[in-house]
Image (tube, rainbow, N blue to C red):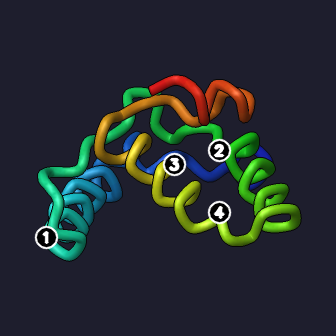
Amino acid sequence: MAATQNKPPATVPAKGAHMLIDLKRNSKYFEVDDLKMPPSFPPNTLNAQRLLTSVNKHQPDKERILALTLWNRTWLTSRDVSSNGKCILFTA
């Protein structure tokens, strides 16, 4: 974001307000309780993306469940997904 002088949505009042509306809208769409803003928003998801890429290559049948698990950890339980793969998978 720094390279483009862009700012995270939560730090721009208009974007932050819209983001809260989006969270409520997504909660309704996915039929889940209110989604939670991760405390470290925006999360660094690079390691999670690398893990998904590796799983896609080596065990593609497991990719969807892993993606859903990561999504749930981020938006439903506000758990950190920026750790290395072992921490992501084995800390419940």
Which secondary structure, mark 3? helix
- Residue 91 to residue 65: above or below: above
Which secondary structure, mark 4? helix
Q: How far apart are marks 3 and 4 (CA)?
A: 12 Å
Quick one: label 3 or label 4, which is nearer the N terminus?
4
Q: Distance between the residues labelled 2 and 1?
A: 24 Å
Quick one: label 3 or label 2, which is nearer the N terminus?
2
Disc 4 crowd rating (10 Å Cα; few below 14, some 14-19, many 20+) is few
Nearest the viewer among 77 and 69 is 69
Q: Residue 90 carries which label?
A: none
Q: How far apart are marks 4 and 1 (CA)?
A: 27 Å
- Residue 60 to residue 41: above or below: below
Quick one: label 3 or label 1, which is nearer the N terminus?
1
- The answer to whether mark 4 and mark 1 are in CB contact below 8 A is no
Residue 39: percent from the left, percent from the top? 38, 28
Mark 3 highlights which residue?
A: 70
Q: What's the residue at 55%, 38% (across, down)? A: 43
